[in-house]
Amino acid sequence: LLAPAYYILSGNATGEGVIISRSLTKTLGIQALNTTGGRFYVLQTNYDPWESPPFYDDRRTPGNICMNEWKQENVGFKSLFNVLSTKPNLNKLTVYTSILTVRDGITTWMQDCVTPCTPW
């Protein structure tokens, strides 16, 4: 690896999803879906999931609130795009949003956060 990374992986079947947090030399953490335990999604922002995000850039809390409001039975392409395109997840540093699925491939949109919009 050239830099630390988050690998976000999914499969074709329900419950197949994981986020792998990596440093340059090792795996730092794994977050897996647990649909039987009520964890129907995993959410990743720019910060390690075991650390609190900085107060000035907490996109995790609003992202979790949005996902929980959608509920598992309503999650799909439209709802994911809505979560990713809602402030503060959408901000002045957002250039594009991509949604990838095993079945449909990748769809990408150029994004623009209309003022008033936070810088991060």
Image (tube, rainbow, N blue to C red):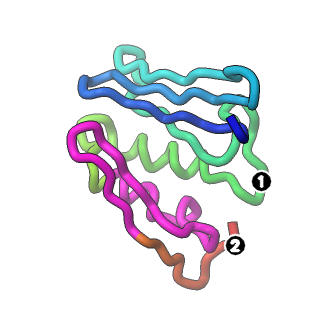
Quadrant of the image occupied by residue 101: top left
Q: Compared with residue 68, is residue 12 higher up or lower down, i.e. above or below?
A: above
Q: Compared with residue 5, is residue 34 higher up or lower down, i.e. above or below?
A: above
Q: Which residues are magenta?
A: 80-109
Residue 24 spot, x, y in % from top left: 75, 31
Q: Compared with residue 109, is residue 107 higher up or lower down, i.e. above or below?
A: above
Quadrant of the image occupied by residue 7: top right
Question: Which residue is pictured at 78% across the width and 50% down the height?
Answer: 54
Residue 112 spot, x, y in % from top left: 50, 77
| Magenta highlight on residue 81 | yes
Image quarter of the N terminus? top right
Question: Which residue is pictured at 69% across the width and 43% down the height?
Answer: 47
Q: Earlier in the sequence, mark 1 or mark 2?
A: 1
Residue 70 spot, x, y in % from top left: 34, 46
Give the amino acid type for the residue marked by disc 2 in the picture.
Answer: Pro
Label 1, residues with CA under 10 Å away: few <14, some 14-19, many ≥20: few
| Magenta highlight on residue 104 | yes
Q: Foreground: 13 or 50? A: 13
Q: Which residue is mark 2?
A: 119
Quadrant of the image occupied by residue 14: top left
Query: Could you tell me how far apart the alpha carbons at marks 1 and 2 are, in whole angstroms?
Result: 13 Å
Q: Which mark is residue 55?
A: 1
